[in-house]
Image (tube, rainbow, N blue to C red):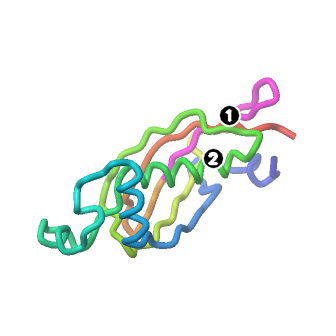
Amino acid sequence: MPVTLLQAKVGEVIHRHARGPATLSQLAYYCAAVGVVDPIHYDRLFAREAGFPDAVVNGSLRIAWMSQVLADFAGPEGRLVRLRCNHRGLLLVGQPMVTELVLAEPIQSEAGMTQIRLDVRCVASGEICDSGEALCELQLR
């Protein structure tokens, strides 16, 4: 485990991941794959007529992205144990998003594994669009 992680303080951002903006084609494919039928997620004109500035990225896709960032952070020998999240705002097609993992509690080690409790923030256009709490386990080296 990196020394910098062991030295991290509660409230400190310990990992950041920038994701490029979702395209309308990606949203359409995602909606088709998981059976989302609400056109605000893949039809810009419909979304605008419904009062949104543009097509809206699905909440379930945003959760999947958060989960991927956490799983990548945990590494191949670690795991994401739990994720609870809240949607706090919109993420629109074409908006990049930054996911920040913030140390929520002091790091605890047991039986060769390190448990890390994290606050998760997803930010788009300077606003938090998603937030959550996660528990990851990392393999000690």
Please state the horizontal and vertical placement of residue 120, each as a whole percent of the image. Answer: 50, 50
> Camera-side residue: 131 or 39?
39
Asked whether, in this view, residue 63 is left or right of residue 32, the answer is right
Residue placed furthest toward the right: 141
**Which residue is painted at 39% across and 48% down in the image?**
34
Q: Secondary structure at mark 2?
A: helix
> Camera-side residue: 41 or 112?
41
Location of residue 74 (image quadrant): top right
Q: Which residues are magenta?
A: 107-120
> Camera-side residue: 8 or 31?
31
Asked whether, in this view, residue 93 is left or right of residue 101, the answer is left
Please state the horizontal and vertical placement of residue 113, each as a whole percent of the image. Answer: 76, 31
Mark 2 and mark 1 residues within 8 Å of each other at the beta carbon: no
Please state the horizontal and vertical placement of residue 15, each as a whole percent of the image. Answer: 63, 57
- Above or below, 107 against 41 in this view is above
Q: Would you say residue 110 sits in the magenta stretch?
A: yes
**Which residue is painted at 54% across and 47% down in the image?**
67
Q: Who comes first in sequence, dot 2 or dot 1?
A: 2
Residue indicated by mark 2: 71
Please state the horizontal and vertical placement of residue 47, each as a whole percent of the image. Answer: 20, 68
Residue indicated by mark 1: 115
Mark 1 burial class by Cα count in 10 Å: few <14, some 14-19, many 20+: many
Q: Which circle, 2 or 1, is nearer the viewer?
A: 2
Provide the major secondary structure of the magenta segment. Answer: strand
Which mark, by number, is residue 29?
none
The three-letter amino acid code for the residue at tag 1 is Gln
Location of residue 107 (image quadrant): top right
